[in-house]
Amino acid sequence: MKERAEKIRAFILENIPNHPKDIVAVTADTFCVTRTTVHRHLNRLVRDRKVIKTGTTKRAVYCLSSSRNKVIDTRIERGLEEHEIWQKLRQDFTSLDKNVFDICEYGFTEIFNNAIDHSQGRHIRVKTEWSIDAVKLVIFDDGVGIFRKIKVALDLADERESILQLSKGKLTTDPKGHTGEGIFFTSRAFDKFYIQANGLSYCKLNVEDDWFIETRKERKEIGTGVSMEIAFDSKRNLRQIFDSYSNSESYKFDKTHILVELSKLEDEAYISRSQAKRVLFGLEKFRQVILDFKDVTTVGQGFVDEVFRVFKSKHPNLKIEFANANEDVKFMIERGASLPSGT
């Protein structure tokens, strides 16, 4: 019995490359067993990480785990186009549900194009990593590093501040050629999104609705690495993500959600007007802003006054809301700005 089971699984592994969509029928016919029996062996191979299954039951596609993990190295030179590289990977993604495929295609082309146009590097490396239930796209370049590039372009005091500005959206060092929307929406489309550069790591975990910054020990790392991961059964949808940050009438990207904690440099408290100005930088481009005070324990009067009175008076058409404020923070905001309760 054990020997027969091993023969069936060996047959599956040998024949999957030529029968990714009908391996169940081919195996059942070859060994005169039921489809249920074949599925049991396939599930074992999936658990053992030897086989990857994508698609629904009726549209299931199987492949060897090693066959989909790819590495592509390319030089950054005139004429390099992101869609040409995507075409080399596209077939591996076609068995995914359309919403997941669309997110992968969008995220890959946006991030690869950023590496071409902004990295000031010479090479780009692309990796795909397929697991039992998710796919990860990783794009590296050997340029100056995205956080340093933003710091210099905007004349910021600290590279950590670059992460705050990047997270707002509509930030680009090339306004004539780019909208600054690509990273914003890509970071919200995937389940997990990481950027590593210049000794810093920015992470957006959408499943847990969490964001954080880490300082990496190795500060001599070259270039920028972006990692994007999404589960095969994800229900995330690009259209819904676009709509949640767009005007219902004009469909323009005019709403942003900012984690106030990202504005803190090292061990600062949220008390000064200068810190508030970091948060407010560039927000005049939007019509609605949600300031998320998650993990912020206290704010000072100067911070509140700069955000909710001074800036608001200069931009009366901009709606500023606040979310996830504890009782102390909510009290300071409402006391300093006479605002209604936050969301």
Image (tube, rainbow, N blue to C red):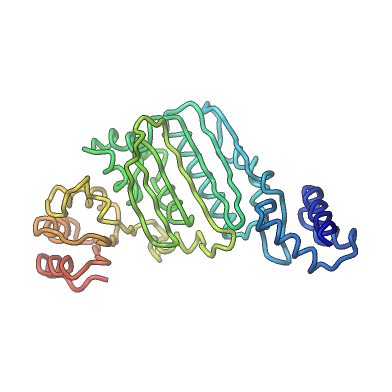
Q: 55 above or below 129?
A: below
Q: Is residue 34 left or right of residue 258?
A: right
Quadrant of the snapshot with the C terminus: bottom left
Q: 201 above or below 145?
A: below
Quadrant of the snapshot with the N terminus: bottom right
Q: Is residue 91 left or right of residue 134?
A: right
Q: Nearer the viewer, residue 195 or 249?
A: 195
Q: How many marks?
A: 0
Q: Position of residue 202 (x, y in %)?
A: 37, 47
In the rendered image, the residue lying farthest to the front is 2
Q: Position of residue 42 (x, y in %)?
A: 74, 60
Q: Residue at x 38, y 63 (%)?
A: 247
Q: Residue at x 64, y 51 (%)?
A: 93
Q: Nearer the viewer, residue 169 or 330?
A: 330
Q: Nearer the viewer, residue 111 or 190?
A: 190
Q: Residue at x 43, y 52 (%)?
A: 187
**Quadrant of residue 56 in the image?**
bottom right
In the rendered image, the residue lying farthest to the bottom is 341
Q: Position of residue 329 (x, y in %)?
A: 17, 65
Q: Residue at x 45, y 34 (%)?
A: 117
Q: Is residue 179 left or right of residue 8?
A: left
Q: Position of residue 311 (x, y in %)?
A: 16, 55
**Quadrant of residue 206 in the image?**
bottom left
